[in-house]
Image (cartoon, rainbow, N blue to C red):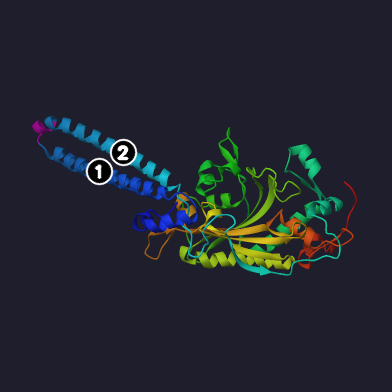
Amino acid sequence: MIDPQLLRENPDLVKASQEARRSSVELVDRALEADGVRRSAIADFERLRAEQNAFGKRVAQAPADEKKALIAEVQQLAASVKDAAQRSQDAEADFTTVVRGIQNIVLDGVPAGGEDDWELVREVGDIPTFDFEPLDHLALGEALGAIDMARGAKVSGARFSFLTGIGARLELAIMNMGLDRAIAAGFIPMITPTLVKPEIMSGTGFLGEHADEVYSLKDDDLYLTGTSEVALAGYHSDEILNLSDGPLRYVGWSTCYRREAGSYGKDTRGIIRVHQFTKLEMFSYVDPADAEAEHERLLAHQEGILQDLGLSYRVIDTAAGDLGSSAARKFDVEAWIPTQNAYRELTSTSNCTTYQARRLDIRSRTETGKTAPVATLNGTLGTTRWIVALLETHQQADGSVVVPEALRPYLGGLDVLVPTGSN
């Protein structure tokens, strides 16, 4: 949720952010109107309650023969206070509903526009070339005995797979490599729940425009998470944190679920766009003043591991309309996929400023002793999709795949993955 004070003091900034996102600008005016009604209702309630308190003292001090005559006024005033309290609560609820529809304020420099309006930050590594016709990741994975899509579809339906043999080991290797890097950087490892309550899912901003991506268990009033960011954000909900020694940093390992609604016909081959995958997610709680520096730090962790895996990639500054409701800025890191002759997203990192913390009531104590919302940030440090870029980038003419040196300790020293034949 955006800062109500910012809404009142600088509505033009909020409108500019909404416009850059190609979202409703009219919603800002509705929020301002609702805020005015809310503040007026609160003032009326507080005025009547003060009158009630003062009148109560008058009644207490009145002679016994006068008190009976004042009872009717006491009851009438009490009824007025009760009505005012209800109006105040209703106005607060209306304002909250409207203001929650406004997306996070984009940071300076974020490009305006939609999915295709990103700006290039940098390209790293040479585009891989081959003196043979490269195979795509599924053909390689099947030959290696690493990926079984057919049986995944038989058991669970389209966009499900089995990672088998070296495929399972490869995913665990990537995840463990990322986990070791995160722990060395001061992140606390977490195995997170993958089912969360509605207020946690909503608090992180995933029940807005992307609600159709989320699996829900209606009988249990729970949601399956598409990233451990959700559980990690909820971990400190309704708490006051101590950030005097610096940020709180967690890295969550979880299975993730996405419906992939609206992606019919896209990436139907292989494991690029599936309903279930594993992900390692960094999550930071920081002082808002340090959020942009923390964002660069998370991005550096991501780039470091991709470089050590020998992948060619680019970093893009995502356009405002493609940020999602919670992020104020997001960097996508896209690896080169040889058989698609294109960069494809492997990981991203988002600065959500205080947006999620306001919705989840996560605060820290300031130097003045008061509390204020913290900033939250997230970034992926390993996921199933990385197997796609690894197999295609490091393949050889005979269908074998060279294991990047940095990954070999996590595969028992294995340096080459060799085809095993048909599944």
Q: Is residue 58 magenta?
A: no
- Where does label 1 land, which residue? 44
Residue 350 makes an appearance in the image: yes
Where does the magenta region start and end? 63-67
Name the side, left or right, on which 323 lies relative to 52: right
> Residue 345 in the image: x percent, y percent?
66, 57
- Where does label 2 land, which residue? 87
> Residue 164 in the image: x percent, y percent?
81, 49
Name the residue located 45 percent from the left edge and 52 percent from the top edge.
358
Residue type, label 2: Arg
Q: Residues within 10 Å of mark 2 (few under 14, many from 20)?
A: some
How many marks do you count on the picture?
A: 2
Q: Nearer the viewer, residue 159 or 51?
A: 159
> Residue 180 in the image: x percent, y percent?
69, 63
- Numbered disc 1: secondary structure: helix
Name the side, left or right, on which 337 lies relative to 348: right
Q: Nearer the viewer, residue 66 or 159?
A: 159
Residue type, label 1: Asp
Residue 256 vs 14, above or below: the answer is above
- Numbered disc 2: secondary structure: helix
Name the residue located 38 percent from the left edge and 57 percent from the top edge.
12
